[in-house]
Amino acid sequence: MTAVSRRAFAIVCLATTALQAPAFAQSVEKLSVEWTLAKTKTPLEREALITVTNAQGQPVSGANIEVKVDMPSMPMMHSVPKATAEPSGEPGRYKTKFTLEMAGEWAAQVEVTKPVRTKVIKKFNVD
Ligand SMILES: [Cu+2]
């Protein structure tokens, strides 16, 4: 390859990368996951309302969300069943319920596996 053709090749590569960038950025973008917890009539049970938005702040529909809760101060002591969130009817909003085993400091791992993998930890207190 001559120096000129090598430079031309490099420019074509750059142009191709630039064209592909938006799709690539979308596939690796991080979702924003927020939640609010509410008490139910059942002691130690909580209902989580989870909101998933993309980098543009738009609601994300069709997400798969699993919630695992544990007590950071008591490793291996609890085994609350994993909860799967269901669509709540509003775009980007999901809900699920789980029952804690005691009062105290808990942490939830909220894991989105679709459309983009995202994992967030939410700490909360149970009284
Ligand atoms: Cu405990």
Image (cartoon, rainbow, N blue to C red):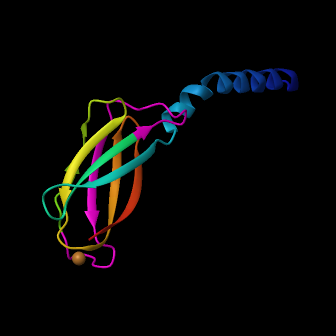
Residue 57: in sight, yes or no? yes
- Give how far across and how far down residue 67 sits, in percent: 27, 53
Quarter of the picture holding the N terminus? top right
Please identify the quarter of the rendering in which residue 121 is found.
bottom left
Q: Nearer the viewer, residue 16 or 77?
A: 77
Q: Is residue 86 above or below residue 41?
A: above
Q: Which is the main secondary structure of the residues drawn in magenta?
A: loop
Quadrant location, ligand no. 1: bottom left
Q: Nearer the viewer, residue 11 or 109?
A: 109
32 to the left or right of 104:
right
Check if residue 75 falls in the magenta segment. yes
Question: Farthest left residue?
Answer: 42
Identify the residue at image location x=18%, y=63%. 80
Residue 84: in sight, yes or no? no
Q: Is residue 7 above or below residue 123?
A: above
- Give how far across and how far down residue 66 sits, in percent: 27, 48
97 to the left or right of 27:
left
Identify the residue at image location x=26%, y=43%. 95
Q: Which residues are magenta?
A: 52-78
Question: Farthest front residue?
Answer: 41
Identify the residue at image location x=26%, y=35%. 88
Identify the residue at image location x=66%, y=27%. 17
- Give how far across and how far down residue 13 sits, in percent: 70, 25
- Give how far across and how far down residue 120 sits, in percent: 41, 54
Q: Nearer the viewer, residue 127 or 92?
A: 127
Question: Farthest bottom residue?
Answer: 73
Check if residue 60 falls in the magenta segment. yes
Q: Is residue 53 above or below residue 80?
A: above
